[in-house]
């Protein structure tokens, strides 16, 4: 009964327009105050404990590093390299759009940032070449989901900090699923290109490929420095974030593209983005603490096992639940709410925490391109100047590719275990 009351309070406050962090925290406070079994002094301690994690400093550092890279002209160089590498494939600029997201993901861990940076360049360019705007918007949006999966991945940092899972292992485990998603999206685009008559652009010469690669090389070196340093034990994920910032500052100074006022503005913007994620984490810390105290994870596990005791069926139920949660909540909020509840269930069923973490991350990200919220698609629609509803039909086959990758990750452990085991 306590859980029902708390969830009802949270849903009611959300319906009234209260921010997610405060709704969850206040729901927990109300329930504990009515029960009277826990001293209220415990509440600020629990609120602070949710954020008292050294690894969370990496969130701010990687966001700042990504912003530095963007201002330093990295996006234009990455687009030029992607065009040289895959522009000659059927589907031309659409293939370039997807490859750009893959390359962009190595310097920025945010799907929203990718959509804003890449979409502002690629959507108008694709429209000028005769691509339908709704197609340009869908390709930009769905390919942006690759960005938070491959390292440096901000969702992986959040998941690792909440569960105690190795963040370095999470980083490496996201590489193969991200590559599979890119291949699937490019394959679907290749198939649709013949149907819609989208032509490739002329093949780049080896000289052009070399020049564009040389221009983008400083940015593309960052993930090798980060992942290599973590795997080799040279620095922790948080220290890797600091190294990434120093590297971004050096690139910006080298290109002379960032002034001192711009740098301070980026610091403020990065701090605001980090605070928006961490305040949700703190509020959900109270919420999750009450759920754990009331035994909600065990109740949910027993409810699932009452339907079926087959671990495959339970995993499918979890995947469906994550998708529904992602439909109504922003990705970080959905991740922060779901992980404390579902992680113990998955581990008790014998799933590897890293494998399960990648499943959770992809599914909550999928919600960011799914109606009715679809924040990433809505942003791309604003860039393209088209209504959100016009993208629904074309979204379905691209979402199907992402779901196929999720099922591979969930039921083929080698997809996420191969690279981490190899490197370790």
Image (tube, rainbow, N blue to C red):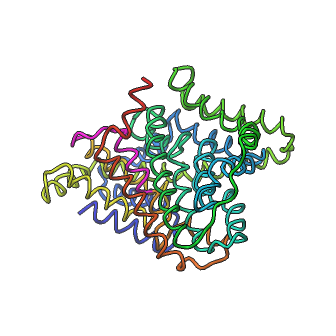
Q: What is the quadrant of the N terminus in the image?
A: bottom left
Q: Is 33 situated above or below 257? A: below
* Residue 353 locus on image (x, y percent): 34, 39
- Tell which of 61 and 152 is nearer to you: 152
Q: Is residue 21 magenta?
A: no
Q: Residue 221's image quarter?
A: top right
Q: Is residue 63 left or right of residue 375?
A: right
- Seen from the viewer's position, the closer of residues 389 and 54 is 389
Is residue 325 among the parts visible in the rendering?
A: yes
| Relative to 302, residue 392 above or below | below
Q: Residue at x 83, y 44 (%)?
A: 258
Give the percent coordinates (x, y) of residue 280: 50, 53
**Picture residue at 48% right of the left edge, 45% below the top:** 179
Q: Is residue 275 above or below residue 246?
A: below
**Residue 402 vs residue 31: left or right?**
right
Q: Position of residue 374 (x, y in %)?
A: 51, 68
Seen in the picture, residue 271 relative to 396 is either above or below; the reply is above
263 vs 40, nearest the viewer: 263
**Image quadrant where one finds the C terminus:** top left
Q: Position of residue 2 (x, y in %)?
A: 27, 60
**Where are the magenta residues, as a range?**
348-364
Q: Residue at x 55, y 67 (%)?
A: 193
Q: What main secondary structure does the magenta stretch of the protein show?
A: helix
Residue occupying the point 74% across, 46% down: 77
Please name whichever residue, 331 or 315, is drawn nearer the observer in this view of the structure.
315
């Amino acid at each position: 009964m306590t859980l029902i009351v708390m969830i009802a309070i949270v849903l009611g406050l959300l319906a009234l327009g209260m921010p997610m962090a405060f709704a969850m925290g206040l729901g927990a406070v109300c329930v504990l105050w009515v029960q009277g079994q826990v001293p209220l002094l415990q509440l600020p301690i629990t609120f602070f404990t949710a954020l008292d994690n050294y690894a969370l400093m990496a969130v701010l550092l990687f966001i700042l590093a990504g912003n530095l890279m963007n201002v330093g002209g990295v996006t234009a160089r990455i687009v030029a390299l992607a065009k040289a590498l895959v522009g000659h494939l059927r589907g031309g600029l659409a293939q370039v759009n997807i490859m750009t997201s893959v390359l962009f993901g190595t310097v920025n861990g945010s799907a929203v940032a990718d959509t804003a940076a890449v979409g502002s360049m690629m959507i108008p360019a694709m429209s000028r070449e005769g691509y339908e705007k709704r197609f340009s918007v869908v390709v930009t949006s769905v390919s942006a989901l690759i960005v938070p999966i491959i390292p440096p991945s901000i969702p992986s940092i959040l998941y690792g900090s909440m569960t105690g899972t190795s963040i370095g292992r999470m980083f490496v485990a996201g590489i193969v699923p991200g590559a599979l998603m890119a291949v699937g999206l490019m394959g679907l685009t290749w198939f649709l290109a013949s149907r819609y008559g989208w032509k490739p652009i002329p093949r780049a010469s080896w000289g052009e490929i070399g020049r564009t690669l040389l221009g983008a090389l400083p940015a593309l070196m960052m993930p090798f420095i980060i992942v290599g340093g973590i795997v080799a034990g040279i620095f922790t994920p948080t220290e890797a974030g600091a190294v990434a910032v120093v590297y971004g500052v050096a690139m910006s100074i080298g290109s002379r593209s960032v002034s001192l006022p711009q740098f301070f503005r980026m610091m403020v913007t990065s701090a605001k983005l980090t605070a928006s994620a961490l305040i949700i984490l703190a509020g959900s810390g109270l919420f999750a603490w009450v759920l754990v105290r009331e035994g909600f994870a065990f109740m949910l596990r027993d409810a699932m096992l009452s339907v079926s005791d087959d671990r495959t069926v339970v995993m499918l139920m979890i995947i469906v639940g994550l998708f529904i949660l992602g439909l109504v909540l922003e990705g970080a909020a959905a991740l922060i709410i779901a992980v404390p509840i579902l992680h113990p269930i998955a581990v008790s069923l014998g799933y590897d925490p890293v494998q399960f973490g990648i499943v959770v991350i992809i599914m909550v990200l999928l919600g960011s391109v799914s109606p009715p919220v679809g924040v990433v698609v809505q942003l791309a629609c604003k860039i393209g100047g088209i209504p959100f509803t016009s993208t629904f039909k074309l979204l379905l086959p691209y979402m199907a590719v992402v779901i196929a990758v999720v099922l591979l990750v969930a039921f083929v452990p080698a997809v996420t275990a191969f690279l981490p085991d190899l490197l370790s």
